Image (cartoon, rainbow, N blue to C red):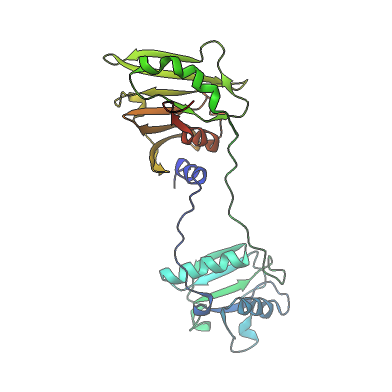
């Protein structure tokens, strides 16, 4: 997955759909000692049994050991097959610091009925690590300021000839540019366009609004996504969200990051989601 798509999924709060793993009770595991600590294979097996896995007993004490006691990490070997790989990934998440490989030929005769073979290496400390929660996207850095932009757009509402929209949220610390906060101008065969400019003390970012659907800037989107029933196009530079475009009311509304993309992805997306028609707002 590209950096832009990974960043987009994080900003949108989307998580990849995991491949369904079989339940623990349907997974048979043979545990071998690969770190030389007496009883570690038995301890790991007991912990997995407590989580519902079917832990197999080796035929004798010698066969409970891996070929050496120098395993620098836990090793998980799975039989070929989608469900076995999903089970191996599930087990790797449970034990932590594990490498997944296909069951090698030398090991297959020792585990004829095992779905997975786990070799406990040096990272195993006699317990299973606490589960690690998936990373949460940082909160958008915005303030609720619906009345900052409205006064700028009201005088231009009838001259624009299309529905103007104002953001209810602004990047924290930003305010309209004191020199030219808003500009209404003509583009492409007489069609109007409006530009809002904001400044956060270090950089400028803005909002562009126009009914012209053929603007060259709208080509090359990275991702299309529907949020709250409204369609958005997302444009990334690497993992940084540079522009969010909302298509509504026969027009396009672009929230554009600063030249250095100083606004976070979550902040830019939150501002775009807060855009509302000025008609009907007081």
Q: Residue furthest left?
A: 189
Counting every numbered tag in the picture gives: 0
Residue 192 picture location, percent across and down: 34, 17
Residue 192 left/right relative to 80: left
Q: Residue furthest top?
A: 179
The front one of 37 and 15 is 15
The front one of 49 and 269 is 269
Q: Is residue 205 visible?
A: no
Q: Is residue 69 visible?
A: yes
Residue located 63% across and 64% down the image:
73
In the image, is residue 95 above or below residue 254? below
Residue 234 left/right relative to 100: left
Residue 224 picture location, percent across and down: 38, 40
Residue located 39% across and 40% down the image:
230
The front one of 4 and 172 is 172
The image quadrant that residue 213 belongs to is top left
The image quadrant that residue 154 belongs to is top left
Residue located 51% across and 42% down the image:
11
Residue 256 picture location, percent across and down: 47, 27
In the image, is residue 186 above or below residue 79? above
Residue 62 left/right relative to 191: right
In the image, is residue 238 above or below residue 115? above
Residue 158 picture location, percent across and down: 37, 16
Q: Residue furthest bottom?
A: 59
Residue 175 left/right relative to 220: right
């Amino acid at each position: 997955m590209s950096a832009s798509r990974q960043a987009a999924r994080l900003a949108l709060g989307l998580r990849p759909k995991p491949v369904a793993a079989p339940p623990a009770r349907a997974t048979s595991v043979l545990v071998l000692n690969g770190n030389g600590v007496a009883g570690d294979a038995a301890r790991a097996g007991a912990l997995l049994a407590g989580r519902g896995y079917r832990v197999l007993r080796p035929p004798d004490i010698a066969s409970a050991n891996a070929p050496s006691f120098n395993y620098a990490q836990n090793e998980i070997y799975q039989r070929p097959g989608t469900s076995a790989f999903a089970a191996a990934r599930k087990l790797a998440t449970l034990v932590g610091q594990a490498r997944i490989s296909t069951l090698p030929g030398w090991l297959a005769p020792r585990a004829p009925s095992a779905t997975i073979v786990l070799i406990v290496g040096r990272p195993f400390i006699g317990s299973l690590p606490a589960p690690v929660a998936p990373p949460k996207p940082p909160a958008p850095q915005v303030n609720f300021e619906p009345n900052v932009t409205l006064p700028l757009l009201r005088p231009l509402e009838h001259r624009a000839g299309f529905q103007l929209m104002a953001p209810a949220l602004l990047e924290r610390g930003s305010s309209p540019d004191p020199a030219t906060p808003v500009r209404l101008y003509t583009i492409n065969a007489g069609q109007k366009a409006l530009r809002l400019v904001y400044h956060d003390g270090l950089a400028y970012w803005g909002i562009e609004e126009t009914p012209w659907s053929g603007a060259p800037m709208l080509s090359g989107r990275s991702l299309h996504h529907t949020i709250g029933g409204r369609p958005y196009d997302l444009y990334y530079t690497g993992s940084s969200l540079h522009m969010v475009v909302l298509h509504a009311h026969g027009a396009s509304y672009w929230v554009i990051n600063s030249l250095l993309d100083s606004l976070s992805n979550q902040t830019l997306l939150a501002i775009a989601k807060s855009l509302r028609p000025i008609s009907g707002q007081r």
